Image (cartoon, rainbow, N blue to C red):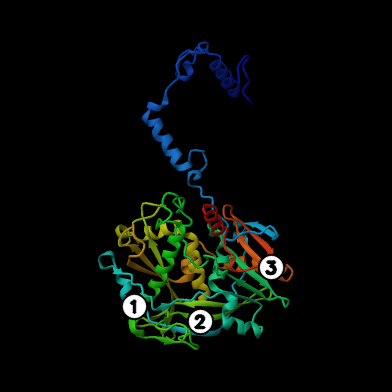
Amino acid sequence: TAKKQQPGHATGWKKRSQLVNRRKQGHDRSRFGGNKVDNSSADAPKKDHRNQPQRNKWAKARAKAWGKGGNRNWGNRVDRQSSVRIDPAWELKEEFDLPQLLKFKANPPTVEDLAWAGHLDTYDAAYDKLSTRSARPLRRDDSVGFYSVSTTDDPVIESYAVKAEGNVYATSDIVAHLMTAGRTVYPWDVVVQKLPDGSLFFDKREASNFDQVTVSETSNDPPKDDEDDPDSVNSPDRLGLEAMVVNQNYTQQILHPNGSGRVTLQHPNPFFDASDSPGMRPAAVGYRYRKFSLSGDINLVCRTELHGVVPKKKGAKADAARQYMTAYALNEWDASKSGGIDFRSKVDGQRGAVLATELKNNAAKLSRWSAQSVLAGADVMKLGYVSRTDKRLNTSHEVLATSQFEPRAFAAQINLSVQNMWGVFAMLVGLVRKQQDGKYVILRDPNKPVVRLYAVPMEFNEDTESEEDSSDEEDEEEDK
């Protein structure tokens, strides 16, 4: 039986409320470990917390983590400009939050190789044995031509479009970017054109910075423009340009020189013309044109890229005589900024910690590289660790080490689902397909995790400048 309540006995919560009321009224607080409080004196001195070291220590730590306004990273907030100027005449068709992309899934497509172009050189295994003590300077060869041709400017893709080989056309850098859009922070835009026959062409603007490699994009404290030093080598744009050059040079330097072990592919490089580029030679890149057939009548014709071949190891099977490789470089710029890590002191003994830090600060970039490697059907993905010789100089670098990964295994390691990649792309294709024939822009909001689809005029100039560039020109005109 339940215990009978004694007369005048207060329940637990009622008893506590009584004690609180007594405390507010200034009664004896002995139960709380204090004495009687006299609230009648308005002139009673207030406690000065400024001279309490422990209190100030935690206040400073909280302000550092959450910002003065109380919101996490408010002090690190950056107001970015849109990647392209949004005309008031544009019509908003669709809008969705980036986190929604995580729920889309699709079965991986069947794949067919259509054509090979360019050439591939053999990987130099000496770069697998590098350490900080045997680091090699990163060389820059201005006689090597690199090409980043968009979809509608690719003559090979154009020939397949004429033959109606597919109904969606794109390049692997555009497709991989869209597949991993959920991890992006910086603004971007992709142009899509829907033809009367229902074909879709995914393009990038020539005036955009789409080809620049982002640096510390997903860091809690990403790089910012310095108003006091507009020519700083650590501004986001300069870091992106530096990373792009580092990646280009790294992919060529890790190959055997003089074309030793070169593999000449089915067709020559479709973008190189010796008569237009005297004294130049094309970079060792293999263009693999592939057809991906997904459910929902999506037949994607895509140009993918490979950066070399890795010779088979002793005892390998005959069909594994040649492994196709992609290569990318992580570049350290200043370990004291953007939550970086010192490559030179960690990469030899704690490479896992270095990679974990890079995964935190460059999640979008590493996801995109992984997706590009999967699209290209690469057997191996080489990841180089490159550092500045002087953190104040962005023109001198050294290759400290190289790691090797299997692309699909690496994607799983960074929690990138291949099913989700294709689900996102299929969703975007379906989004544009239900629109009328015309031209559209898929655009990420510069300051919110939101993607929008705009209908733009057919005469929309794909060389349209970014909003940031246009504002800079307006400032210059005002100065004049």
Query: Mark 3: which amino acid?
Result: Val
Residue depicted at x 51% and y 71%: 372
* 404 sits left or right of 293 in the view: left
* 337 sits left or right of 16 in the view: left
- Disc with the residue nearer the chain's start (1 vs 3): 1
Image vertical order of residue 170 relative to residue 240, above or below: below
Which of discs 1 and 2 lies nearer the camera? The answer is 2
Residue under label 3, please give it. Answer: 432
Q: Residue furthest front?
A: 480
Q: Position of residue 440 (x, y in %)?
A: 67, 66
Density class for disc 1 (Cα within 10 Å; few <14, some 14-19, many ≥20) is some
Which quadrant would residue 106 be assigned to in this image? bottom right
- Disc with the residue nearer the chain's start (2 vs 3): 2
The residue nearer to you, when weighing 48 against 323, is 48
Residue under label 1, please give it. Answer: 124
Q: Position of residue 358 (x, y in %)?
A: 42, 59
Look at the numbered disc 1 and give the secondary structure of its residue: loop
The residue nearer to you, when weighing 5 against 109, is 109
**Is residue 377 at all visible to an observer of this figure?**
no
Q: Position of residue 468 (x, y in %)?
A: 54, 57
